[in-house]
Every structure is written in structure tokens, then in C-alpha cells.
Image: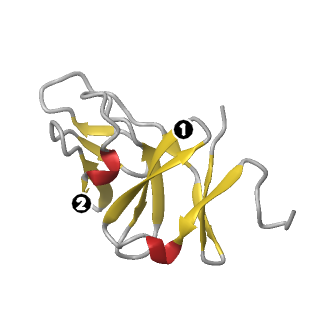
Amino acid sequence: MSSDVVADEVRVCRLDDLLPERGAGALVGEHRIAVFRLADDRLLAVQQRDPYSGANVLSRGIVGDVDGAPTVTSPMFKQVWDLVTGACLDPVGKDPVDLRTYPVRLVGDEVRVAVTP
């Protein structure tokens, strides 16, 4: 194993497979993950499951920002989360529920996501 690969990382795609300002869903073991490529090529990953609807749709959410923080808005009920921290920024009248985030990095042209228990 090369020194730039972490044991619990899994290759999910190539960078060119991700469109800027869009998400893509990935299944890593039993983890459903939404991976986002921002306009500046930063990569971020959160759980795919929308905690309010229960649907695995967050990769289809609207990418934006709130005060400079990258966000995703659920395509279901329009809750907004910070993509870096997973914090719920706008629960749309419900109790806030944060998202699980996953470490993601670029190794060469491979997008890798780490999943840990």
C-alpha cells in the first residue's frame, strides 16, 4: 500500500466524474454517501440520507453557501446543512438534525472517502 493511501479509504470515482457544484451518490460498504465537488475543486462528503424525509437524496440537493460556508439544501423539504461540519443551518421549522460528514481527499485523480465506525 502506498504511503498516501489510508487503510479505511475507498476510491469512489475520478475527479472528472464529478461536476462542479453538484453531488454524486456513492455506496461505500454499508455507507450511502453524497460526495460534492465545489467550484474551487474542494471535495466534501456527507451522508446521503436526508434525516427529515428518510430518502437517500442529498447528492441531488442544491449546492450553495451561507456566509461563505458551502451548503447543501435538501431536494425534499428544503433543510440546509453546512457541507464542512454537517451542522443543520435551517431546519425549516423542525428540530435541527446534523449530518454525518466523511473525510474525502484527492489522490492523483482518484476521489477517496474514508469510512470509520
Q: Secondary structure at mark 2?
A: strand
Q: Which callout, 2 or 1, points at the residue further toward the start of the chain?
A: 1
Count of numbered badges drawn on the protein: 2
Q: Amino acid at mark 1?
A: His
Residue type at mark 2 is Gly
Instruction: Indicate the position of residue 56 as horizontal and vertical percent values.
Output: 35, 38
Residue 26 versus residue 47 in the image, above or below: below
**Left or right of residue 1, residue 9 in this image:** left
Q: Which residue is mark 2?
A: 64
83 up-or-down from 76: above or below: below
Task: Please give left or right for residue 14 compared with residue 24 in the image.
Answer: right
x then y, percent, for residue 109 = 60, 77
Residue sitting at x 44%, y 46%: 46
Q: Which residue is mark 1?
A: 31
The residue positioned 76% from the left and 56% from the top of the image is 6
Spatial CA distance of label 2 from label 1 is: 24 Å
Q: Residues within 10 Å of mark 2 (few under 14, many from 20)?
A: some
Q: Residue at x 47, y 37 (%)?
A: 100
Residue 87 picture quarter? top left
